[in-house]
Image (tube, rainbow, N blue to C red):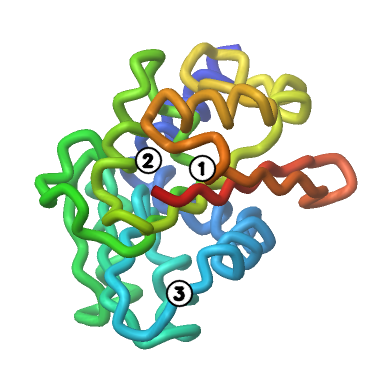
Amino acid sequence: MELARRFARQLAHPQGVMGQALGGLMDLANRRPMRVALDLLDIRPGEWVLDAGCGTGAALAALLRKADCQAVGIDASPTMIAAARRRLGRRARLFLRRVEQSGFADGGFDAILALNILYFCGRDGGMAKALYALLRPGGRLVAYVTDRRTMENWSFARQGLHRLYDEAELVSTLIDAGFAPDHIVVHSAPVTRTVKGLWILASR
């Protein structure tokens, strides 16, 4: 049980050598979720794009291969920001910040990518509300989480550090953040034979 809790803590805030190794493993595990999310985000040249919880910068690197955009990444983990800087150099603007305290002006982004971070959105919805505020009118958010029914089978997800979602709970969180119900679409699909993923596309 202690091992599961330590793993959950590292997922919430990667740090040190273990955090670096975990970042690499998560990049491998998230290849399909990332590809689907980037296709849904449909970045256009010149757009300002935020990767909220950018981790090692893998999604930003893939994003920059798809479109000539203004890429920005934030993460609350110094270990992950350091890894992203090693990967991306000057190709993206990277900041050590929490989503809720990003310091960016409201309405500054055309698109936001939020992979595996809504697990850490508090019951007050502060993270989701911050994501909504950062989008310009007409801007779009793509978020990914693993479905509750999958995560309930994982011991680390039962340690109280991850917020779990089914489709209805994910939609409700974004509605509470300010997104209109008719501007939200959920895509549910297998990631592997035993893992079900939820992607959500929402526009402001």
Residue 43's disc number: 3
Residue 65's disc number: none
Q: Nearer the viewer, mark 1 or mark 2?
A: 1
At x 41% / y 32%, what residue is drawn? 12
Name above or below for residue 70 compared with residue 65. above
Q: Determine whether the residue tagged by mark 3 lies in a helix, strand or loop.
A: loop
Q: Residues within 10 Å of mark 2 (few under 14, many from 20)?
A: many
Query: Which of the pair 117/57 is nearer the observer?
Result: 117
Could you tell me which quadrant the N terminus lies in?
top right
What residue is shown with label 2? 14
What residue is shown with label 1? 116
Q: CA distance from mark 1 to mark 2?
A: 13 Å
Q: CA distance from mark 2 to mark 3?
A: 28 Å
- Counting residues from the start of the chain, the first of labels 1 and 2 encountered is 2
Q: CA distance from mark 1 to mark 3?
A: 19 Å
At x 51% / y 65%, what residue is drawn? 41
